[in-house]
Amino acid sequence: MTKKIFLSIITVSFLAVTAAIFLLTGVSYRYAADTSAEHLRQSCTMIASAVEQSGGRYLDETDFGELRVTWISAKGRVIFDSQHDPVQLDDHSDRQEVGEAMRSGEGSSARYSDTLMTRTVNHARRLSDGSVIRVSAEQRSFPALLLKNLQPLAVMLTALALCSFGLAILISRHIVRPINNIDLDHPKTEKSYKELAPLLKKLRKQNGRINRQMIELRQSREQFSLTTESMSEGLIVADQKANILTSNTSAYTLLGAEKHDSDHTVFSLCRTEQFRRCIQNAMGGRRSECLISTDGGERKVIASPANSHDTVNGIVVFILDVTEQQQLETMRREFTSNVSHELKTPLTTIYGISDMLANGMVKPEDVPALSGDIRHEADRLITLINDIVSLSKLDEEEGAPRQDEEVDLYELAEDVISRLRMSAEEKHVTAELTGDHVTVLGSRTILDEVIYNLCDNAIKYNNEGGSFSVKVSHIPMKAIVTVSDTGAGIPEAHLGRIFERFYRVDKSRSRKIKGTGLGLSIVKHGVSYHGGTVRVDSTVGKGTAFTVELPIEKRRT
């Protein structure tokens, strides 16, 4: 310890002195360089002024000493140089300081020579005729300055090193002496450093500290148990023989197993082949996953080995409830299947009719009817694609920043009814709009699709000569749009599924009615996008009423 303290003092002293020398030398060098540069600039200004007044005669008659003065024409040719023959000098227009002077009237630069360890400083000024006067001077570089002062610096460092050596020995011994005199069996803080008092007290209370650590360890295990018990995911830790070391209640709940008080293995929790193989793979050193079905739903099991020095010391098993995820995946597959089916039906019809037309298998008088069928199926296909695109946009916009505007629901409903007037007249369905002008903050396009689909359904699924009504009203902080019709109604058994994509209440009847089965899905997503709700009330044989409630928000300023 004495040696370490001694070396530390010596090292710190040497580094501090060396840093101080370099810092002072650098500051002095910088001050001298700045002073020299300012002197050079003043000299250049004075010489340029004299040349402006007296021309080249001033340069020929003046001794500039160590300064090098160069006169350069506007095209870069050297006219005069105080130290070299101008004829032997090349074009100077590419010099940094000359270029800056030609552009802005004044320029400076510095060039270093590693071999000579010198620094050449240049300053140039442009004259009124476009020519440039440049003044140059050589300065010692920072390394050269250090080399020049090397001998006195070496003497100074040697003297300081000797002083530091002696002081370091005395200080290190003085610091270590009280520590070496400590009685470890009966440590006393009075005869030692105050900084060592906590250490000495810890030595006296070592047994007490160990007891406290045991208590803390027990508390940590209890806290770990409480934490794992609060997890909704199942957790099992087992040894290399699959004996359960610790587990939480969720593991037994998700697997549908009973918790035993006695020791048992992981295999006793689930008897399926997939679970057994997953655990065995983890015990063999491979991370493994599997899906199992229980009475409570679908479970995902993740088993990972706990390795130490390439040896499996145990396994960690996570059990996750993926019932909802699997249901969503099933819905996605059903949606894909439905889309494929719905797209295939009109395409098959179009292909079949066009093939008959191409092969001349159709009588001329039947061509208009078949062309109309092609157009009808094409319209159906376009409508289906537009609805799918609308749903996709709604799915994308649910997580995107909203760009809302103020929308008058009464005016919007009035515009929708106007656009559907021809469809209503074809079926002899009358429309009625009542209520108040209620303004909400939202997307005009999405709200238009919501009201349009509800009104379109009220016409398509209405009885011949029936009617439908749209009522716009409001209660505190909520706008209400009700679309009711006098159609056949929806059986109660189907009310819970009508907002599903492609769901049809009466498929045989729906095929006769132009539609895609996506309208109410668009309504549900559009209302949800605005933070609202939609509900349906229907009586078979009397009609159906859809009620949309939207929050009324004020535009933020």
Image (tube, grey):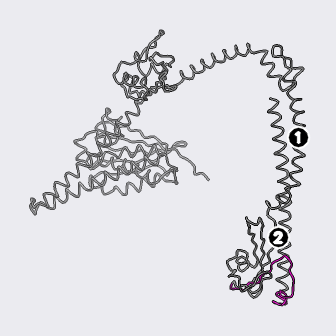
Q: Residues within 10 Å of mark 2 (few under 14, many from 20)?
A: many
Identify which residue, 409 or 553, lies in the foreground. 553
Quadrant hosting residue 502: top left
Q: Position of residue 84 (x, y in %)?
A: 76, 82
Residue 478, disc: none
Quadrant of the image for the N terminus?
top right
Please tell me how crowded label 1 is: few (under 14), some (14-19), or many (20+) other residues with Cα within 10 Å: some
In this view, 455 is above or below 35: above
The residue type indicated by label 2 comes to Ala
Asked if the magenta segment contains residue 368, the reply would be: no
- Quickly name the residue at label 1: 164
- Look at mark 2 in the image and give the residue it sits on: 37
* Segment tinted magenta in the rendering: 51-75
Mark before the other along the chain sequence, 1 or 2: 2
Q: How many marks?
A: 2
Query: Residue at 30% of width from left, 47% of height from top?
Result: 516
Q: Nearer the viewer, residue 281 or 75?
A: 75
Q: Residue at x 81, y 89 (%)?
A: 56
Instruction: Report helix, strand or loop for mark 2.
Output: helix
Residue 38 x %, y %: 84, 71
Left or right of residue 73, residue 68 in this image: right
